[in-house]
Amino acid sequence: MPRTGRRPGAGGTRTKILAAARKHFARFGFEAGTVRGIAAEAAVDPALVLHYFGSKEGVFRAAVDFPVDPAEFVPQLLAPGLDGLGERLVNFFLETWDSPAGRPLLALLRSAVASEDAAALLREFVTREVLGRLARALRVDQPQLRASLAASSLIGMAMLRYVVKLDPLATARPEVVASWLGPAVQRYLTDPGLTSARPRPRRHRSPGVPTTKVARP
């Protein structure tokens, strides 16, 4: 959160830092991104980034403009246990997007259609901050892959519901959407057989050459 006692012109400086952070995280991701890199992009002292946002995590969340801290709501999603986790997660995102506080996040979602920077920032946030936290807390194998697969379902649903506005998904009640999509998200996050299954080998043959069986003597 921003600290008190801002100097004149602080609003402009904060806005400039956020714009620089969006570009920086879109280019490098969260792990490789740095406060110094953001400060250099914004042409400010790194201490100013920490002054306004407290940490790299703080400026990342502010850049996405997500209304709730994932460190707070992820434990709440996990508290009732694994049963129904996928449905609770979908419900949470729908409630967030449908609320007034979720409008900046919807703006980022719409921007992702035309802007690769916006798309990369959104993917990074949902995968790392939300679903990555869930997967790590569940102690499952390949948590990042699972988080990415779950993110693809959530972001794809949001694009069709809020940007493309494809009916009947766009006008369906949130609880109905969650009841359909929740089991798929649940499988990505918790199914032990998902990542252990081996892909079937593909058979190669020349086009136009029919497959024939050779009779054994």
Image (cartoon, helix red, strand yellow):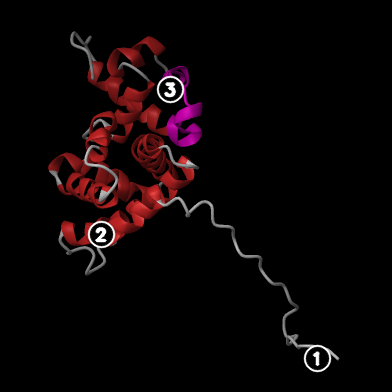
- Image mark for residue 215: 1
Q: Count the numbered circles shown.
A: 3
- Image mark for residue 161: 2
Q: Which portion, as a residue range, is magenta? A: 24-42
Q: Which residue is mark 3?
A: 38
Callout 3: SS: helix
Q: Along the polypeptide, which appears first: circle 2 or circle 1?
A: 2
Q: Is residue 68 rendered to the left or right of residue 157?
A: left
Q: Quadrant of residue 121?
A: top left
124 or 73: which is nearer to us? Answer: 73
Q: Quadrant of residue 138?
A: top left
> Which residue corresponds to the image point at 31% horizontal and 58% vertical from the top-left?
183
Q: Amino acid at mark 3?
A: Ile
Q: CA distance from mark 3 to mark 2?
A: 33 Å
- Above or below 177: residue 28: above
Tell whether label 2 touches label 3 (CB within 8 Å): no
> Which residue corresponds to the image point at 46% horizontal and 17% vertical from the top-left?
36
Q: Amino acid at mark 1?
A: Ala
Q: Is residue 106 visible?
A: yes
Q: Quadrant of residue 77?
A: top left
**Residue 65: horizontal and vertical position, in percent?**
27, 34
Q: Along the polypeptide, which appears first: circle 3 or circle 2?
A: 3
- Using a 10 Å C-alpha cutoff, classify the residue at mark 2 as few (fewer than 14 neighbours), some (14 to 19) or many (20 or more): some
Q: Is residue 38 magenta?
A: yes
